[in-house]
Structure formats: structure tokens, C-alpha cells
Image (cartoon, helix red, strand yellow):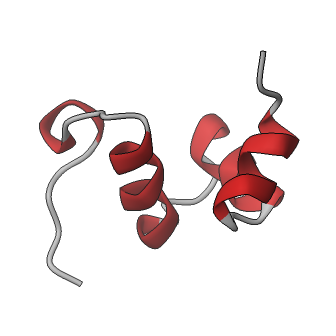
Amino acid sequence: MLSQKDFCQMHGIPPYRLSNLIHGTRSAWRYRRMVNQLLDITADITYEVRND
């Protein structure tokens, strides 16, 4: 099983940003899009589509 720390290291995501996404303390759109793509999560399920 892959840990959150290992996942972050493999994909260049700061661990605190992944934590922000998991707990909803910050939107972190850049990393949210990256994680969604890596985990094959569709945008309409996880957040409103934004243009930034």
C-alpha cells in the first residue's frame, strides 16, 4: 500500500497541501487538479470547475 507521504514524494506534491485537500482546510486548486487526474477522479464530483 502506498502512504500519503510516498504518494506526495512520487508526484511532487507538498504533504501539507494533500492534507489541506483531504481535510478541506484550503482549496489548493493546482494540486487538487493534479490529484484528481492522478486518481482518475472526475471534476464534477469533487469540486466546481474553475478557470484559474
The quadrant in which the N terminus is found is top right
The picture places residue 10, in percent across and down from the top left corner, at 72, 54
**Is 39 situated above or below 52?**
above
Outermost residue to the bottom: 52
Residue 46 lies left or right of residue 29; in this view the side is left
**Front residue (pair 32, 5):** 5
**Front residue (pair 45, 1):** 1
The residue depicted at 37 percent of the width and 45 percent of the height is 36
Residue 9 lies left or right of residue 39; in this view the side is right
Number of numbered discs present? 0
The picture places residue 21, in percent across and down from the top left corner, at 58, 47
The residue depicted at 36 percent of the width and 59 percent of the height is 33
The picture places residue 7, in percent across and down from the top left corner, at 72, 43
Residue 37 lies left or right of residue 9; in this view the side is left
The quadrant in which the C terminus is found is bottom left
**Is 41 situated above or below 28?**
above
**Is 46 situated above or below 27?**
above
The picture places residue 50, in percent across and down from the top left corner, at 17, 68
